[in-house]
Image: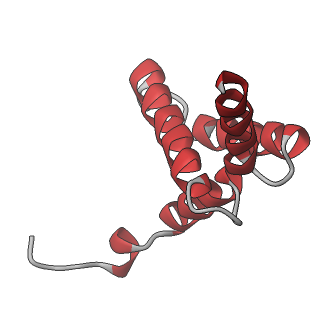
Amino acid sequence: FLYIDPDSVMSLNLSLNLALMAIVGGLGTAHGPIIGAMLVTAVAFGMQDYLGNQISGLTQIAYSAIVIAVLLSAPSGLGPAVGRVVARRLSWRR
């Protein structure tokens, strides 16, 4: 219990998840990686809750599908796209 293994603290899977959160959310904004973290975490917990550990590589396939969908629909990430939608909504109410 008192031993810290470098693979358990900063494994390749954890590093890729952190990079994925930033890429999906958008690298140029402060709120983008937060949005990306919420999406990636929700997908991870949803896949784990729905499937358990039946298929080990399915989460990576889901992450790949998310990255492809986000990069095709919003190349700068979800953060700036969500910011534009919120700005339009706020200007519409005035």
Within the image, what quadrant is residue 48 found in?
A: top left
The quarter of the rendered structure image containing the N terminus is bottom left
Q: Which residue is most to the right?
A: 72
Is 12 left or right of 62, judged from the image as shown? Answer: left
| Residue found 79% across the figure and 41% down from its top | 70
- Residues 37 and 62: in front is 37
| Residue found 39% across the figure and 24% down from its top | 49
The quarter of the rendered structure image containing the C terminus is top right
Above/below status of 32 relative to 6: above
- Residues 31 and 72: in front is 31
Is 80 left or right of 5, judged from the image as shown? Answer: right
| Residue found 71% across the figure and 66% down from its top | 28
Image coordinates for residue 9, horizontal then vertical, percent: 34, 72
Above/below status of 20 relative to 59: below
- Residues 15 and 79: in front is 79
Image coordinates for residue 7, horizontal then vertical, percent: 40, 74
Image coordinates for residue 23, horizontal then vertical, percent: 70, 58
Is 45 left or right of 39, judged from the image as shown? Answer: left
Image coordinates for residue 55, horizontal then vertical, percent: 55, 31
Is 12 left or right of 24, judged from the image as shown? Answer: left
